[in-house]
Amino acid sequence: MYLVVGANGFLGSYLIKNILEQTDETILAADLHCPEKNNDRINWIKCDITKEADVAELNEKTKKAHDLKIIYLPVFFNVNKNPANDKIAWAVNVTSYARFVDVMENVKVFYSLSTDMLFKTSREIPYTEKDPIDPMNDYARHKAIEERMAEAKGYNIVRLPVMTAPSLSPVKKHFFDDVVSNLRNGQSMQFFTDSRRSMIDFDTVAKTLIALTNTPEAQKEPVLNVAGDESLSKYDFALRLADKYGLNKDLIIPVSMDDDTTIWKEKRPKTVLLDNTLVKHLLGLKELKMNI
Ligand SMILES: NC(=O)c1ccc[n+]([C@@H]2O[C@H](COP(=O)([O-])OP(=O)(O)OC[C@H]3O[C@@H](n4cnc5c(N)ncnc54)[C@H](OP(=O)(O)O)[C@@H]3O)[C@@H](O)[C@H]2O)c1
């Protein structure tokens, strides 16, 4: 049985789709907001991980589950300093995570997700799992704390770069959807040419995560990078998207990070790549590429 927490988010929706398509396991899908889609394989449960009683209920509902695999996704994305949000972010990302890993009793496999924002120095050589971390903002500092807690519990972390793909939610659009709809409407958009990441798509990450939950050898690695083989800029991504959907490439305006002060409020490194050699070796994959 899978328990997916934060199951109605971008990655969660792709996980649900892939668990249903690729396994015969049942799913307890927990989130703040749930779609009305219960059937004999999936049971949605409204849950706020900042509420002790909600987490206790998840524990009760999974106590007798056979081979419980938990994938934990909730996050408060606090990249810009904002005192109004700092306490909420700490409560969601740190305090609630600490309680969650403490309360859940019947765990066979536990994966949480971390980020390439653990590295704030631009470099062309991809960061491996062994490189010392140096978080670039509070979001990443909270992920660093989560990583240490997961390690202390003997649980697993997957570090991810920026992910993209159409949102599967009818109410929550992803940046991907905005780009497609803007270009379709003839609206130009600016994209950085010199900010490069090991970009990957939600579907590929979901499939890889499910494979990891079923690969005991991989679970011996406390931290694994799941990232694309290519070093891609947002500009490269936009051109690929235009190719795929037959959109007008003239609307995709290249810009340099050096010339911009509006797209990102805080300073970010130009190139941060994640080395995916280990995960490909463990899962016997020849390549891991953004598939959009
Ligand atoms: N997306 C990326 O490019 C990226 C890159 C690196 C790492 N990650 C990590 O991957 C994970 C999933 O990312 P994502 O893009 O799928 O994020 P997401 O769409 O925000 O998914 C997280 C889900 O958790 C829910 N949630 C938030 N607070 C909660 C709470 N208190 N109790 C229960 N559920 C709660 C969210 O609900 P609401 O939408 O209603 O808030 C959302 O449905 C996160 O841990 C993120 O840090 C993502």
Image (cartoon, rainbow, N blue to C red):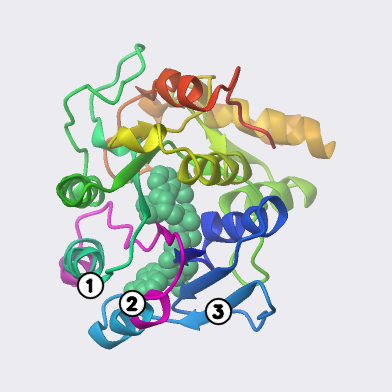
Q: Which residue was labeled with disc 2? A: 59
Looking at the rendered structure, the secondary structure element under dot 2 is: helix
Examine the image and state in which quarter residue 140 appears.
Answer: top left
How many C-alpha atoms fall within 10 Å of the one at disc 1: few (<14), some, or many (≥20)? some
Ligand 1 lies under 8 Å from the Cβ of mark 3:
no
Q: Which of 247 and 167 is in front in this view?
A: 167
How many C-alpha atoms fall within 10 Å of the one at disc 3: few (<14), some, or many (≥20)? many
Residue type of the residue flagged with mark 2: Asn
Q: Where is residue 231 in the image (x, y as percent from the top left)?
A: 50, 19
Q: Position of residue 89 (x, y in %)?
A: 23, 65
Residues shaded magenta: 60-89
Q: Which residue lies furthest to the right in this view?
A: 246
Residue type of the residue flagged with mark 3: Trp
Looking at the rendered structure, the secondary structure element under dot 3 is: strand
Examine the image and state in which quarter residue 249 appears.
Answer: top right
Q: Which residue was labeled with disc 1? A: 103
Compared to residue 208, the image places residue 67 above or below, namely below
143 sits to left or right of 3: left
Residue type of the residue flagged with mark 1: Val
Q: Is residue 63 magenta?
A: yes
Q: Distance between the residues labelled 1 and 3?
A: 20 Å
Q: How far apart are marks 3 and 2 (CA)?
A: 15 Å
Q: Distance between the residues labelled 2 and 1?
A: 7 Å
Where residue 77 is drawn, which disc sits there?
none
How many C-alpha atoms fall within 10 Å of the one at disc 2: few (<14), some, or many (≥20)? some
**Do the residues bearing badges 2 and 1 touch, measured as CB atoms within 8 Å?**
yes
Q: Which residue was labeled with disc 3? A: 44
Image quarter for ligand 1: bottom left
176 sits to left or right of 29: right
Q: Which residue is rendered at x = 51% and y = 66% of the image?
A: 7
